[in-house]
Image (cartoon, rainbow, N blue to C red):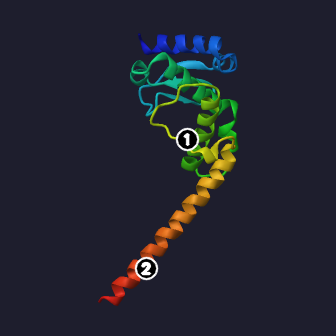
Amino acid sequence: MKAGKKMEKARVQLLLDNPFFGHLASYLELKDDESLDNPIGTDHKKIYFNPKMIENLDESKVKSCIAHGILHTALGHQWRRESRSEETWNSATDIAINWILKESGFELPPKLRLRSDFKNKSAEEIYSEITLEEKKNQKGSEKNSDKKKRQKKRFR
């Protein structure tokens, strides 16, 4: 089945199986975009999809991808980022969304690992925890680096 038809079919099925998500998805135009690195992306007006990636997914996974994309819009992630790091913010919002999807019964990729300590947390809470962990890891690696420098000096 062609990707465009698959997207349309999945969106209709989403409306039947999960009316909340399907209703939200019905407001966004579908547009193919082969340049995407992911199956689906959104600018909060359209759902862009990579046809080659979509063709390789079954309907259940396409529905999950659509629901994931529309939740970014529905939850206002583009406006809530503020001055936060884009990369870390995107990770935090994806984690929050994936927990919502899991709890809503959507099929998630088998390799996707969800940390239980992030369950029921907002993107802001997850972002704060990730940032704190990154700072701790950075301090730890700086200490190790300083220790190695001191050891090198001793053995010269």
Q: Residue furthest front?
A: 116
Q: In the picture, which quadrant includes the N terminus?
A: top left
Quarter of the figure with residue 37: top left
Where in the figure is residue 129, as x and y percent of width and height?
63, 54
Q: In the picture, which quadrant includes the C terminus?
A: bottom left
Q: Residue furthest left?
A: 156
The residue at the point 51 percent across, 15 percent down is 7
Residue under numbered circle 1: 114
Whether residue 82 can be seen here: no
The amino acid beneath tag 1 is Leu
Dot 1 surroundings within 10 Å: few (below 14), some, or many (20 or more)?
few
Mark number displayed over residue 147: 2
- Number of marks drawn: 2
Mark number displayed over residue 138: none
Front residue of 119 and 89: 119
- Circle 2: element type: helix
In the image, 105: left or right of 52?
Answer: right
In the image, 3: left or right of 101?
Answer: left
* Residue 79 position (above or below residue 20): below
Where in the figure is residue 146, as x and y percent of width and height?
44, 78
The residue at the point 42 percent across, 12 percent down is 2
Where in the figure is residue 63, as x and y percent of width and height?
55, 20
Q: Are the residues flagged by discs 2 and 1 in contact, CB closer than 8 Å?
A: no
- Circle 1: element type: loop
Query: How far is mark 2 from mark 1, CA to CA?
Result: 34 Å
